[in-house]
Image (spheres, rainbow, N blue to C red):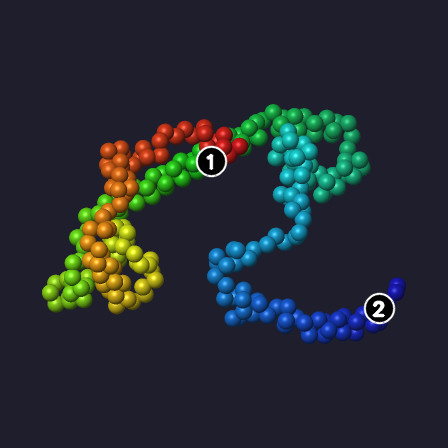
Amino acid sequence: MPTLPHLKDIVVAFFRGALATWIRFSSEFAPGGLIDEASASERQAAWMPATNDANEGALGQLRVIMRNHPTLTLHQFNAMVMFNQKNTQDFMDALFEMPDHLYIMRLARKEDASGIERTRKTELAEFRVRLAKMRKEKEVAKRKKEVDDLRILMKVRLVSTVAQIYDTARGANLTVKLLHQQLDAFRLRGVPDIKANSTYPRKPDKQAALESALRNFQFAPGSYPIPEAIVSKVSVAEIRPVTQVLGEWHPEEDVEMEE
C-alpha cells in the first residue's frame, strides 16, 4: 500500500501560505466590516447567485427540461431526477423481473391519472386570485387613506402669525404632530421650499421651516390656493365611493395576466 510521508508537510505549507491572504479575503466578514455593518436592504441589493450559470441547480434543470418537454408535469420531473440520481436503472437491471416492471407501470399510470398536476395548477390559480384580491384591497385602502388625508389637510386652519408657531403661553402649543400637519397643509397649497418632514429632525427645525413657509405664503397672498386637481380628486371620491375608483375587476383577468 503506497504511503504519503510528505502529505502532512505539504498540507501545512499550503495553509501557511493561504493564511497570508486569508485575512485580506475575509476582512469584509469581520466584526465592523462591510458585511457586518450592512443593513438588510443593502445585503439584499448585494445578493448574487452562487454560480454564474442559471441552468445549474434543480430550478435551472427544471427550466431547461420544461423548455424541451413542455407537457412534462412537476411530479414526473421529480421522479426523473430521483431516478437518475439514485442509479435506479442499474438497480432495475440487476433485480427487476417482468412482474416488477408491470407493477411499476401500473403505479405510474395510476399516479398520472390521479390529477396531481391538475390539483397543483388549480391551487396556484386560486392563490394568484387571492393575491390579486389582496393587492386590490391594499390599493383601495391606500387610495382611501390618501383621500382622507387630503380632506383633513384641506380643512386645516393655517397659522397666521409667527407668534402662533413659538408662543406656547398663548395656547398655541403646536406639537410635533401639529407642526407636521401645518407643513403638509402649506405644502398642499404649493408653498415653495418646504422639504419632507423627516428632513427636519428637531422641533426647532420644524418650527423654523413652518415660519419660512408662513412668510412665503404671506408674501404673495392669494397665490397659493388649494390646487383644483386636489379639490376634484376629493370631490370625485365623495361622489363615487373610493372602493370603485379602480373600476370593475374580475379575478380571471389577473389569472390570465399571470399565465
Q: Position of residue 106 (x, y in %)?
A: 67, 26
The quadrant of the picture occupied by the N terminus is: bottom right
In this rendering, the answer to whether 111 lies above or below 192 is above
The residue carrying pointer 2 sits among few (fewer than 14), some (14 to 19) or many (20 or more) residues within 10 Å by Cα, namely few
In this rendering, the answer to whether 248 lies above or below 201 is above
The residue carrying pointer 1 sits among few (fewer than 14), some (14 to 19) or many (20 or more) residues within 10 Å by Cα, namely few
Dot placed on the residue nearer the N-terminal end, 1 or 2: 2
Q: Residue at x 62, y 43 (%)?
A: 59
67 left or right of 231 in image: right
Q: Position of residue 227 (x, y in %)?
A: 26, 45
97 left or right of 232 in image: right
* Identity, as a three-letter code, of the amino acid under mark 2: Leu
SS of the residue under disc 1:
helix
Q: Residue at x 30, y 56 (%)?
A: 192
* Identity, as a three-letter code, of the amino acid under mark 1: Phe
Q: Position of residue 240 (x, y in %)?
A: 27, 33
Q: Residue furthest left?
A: 170
Pointer 1 residue: 127
Q: Residue at x 72, y 40 (%)?
A: 84
- CA–CA distance in space, label 1 to label 2: 61 Å
Pointer 2 residue: 4
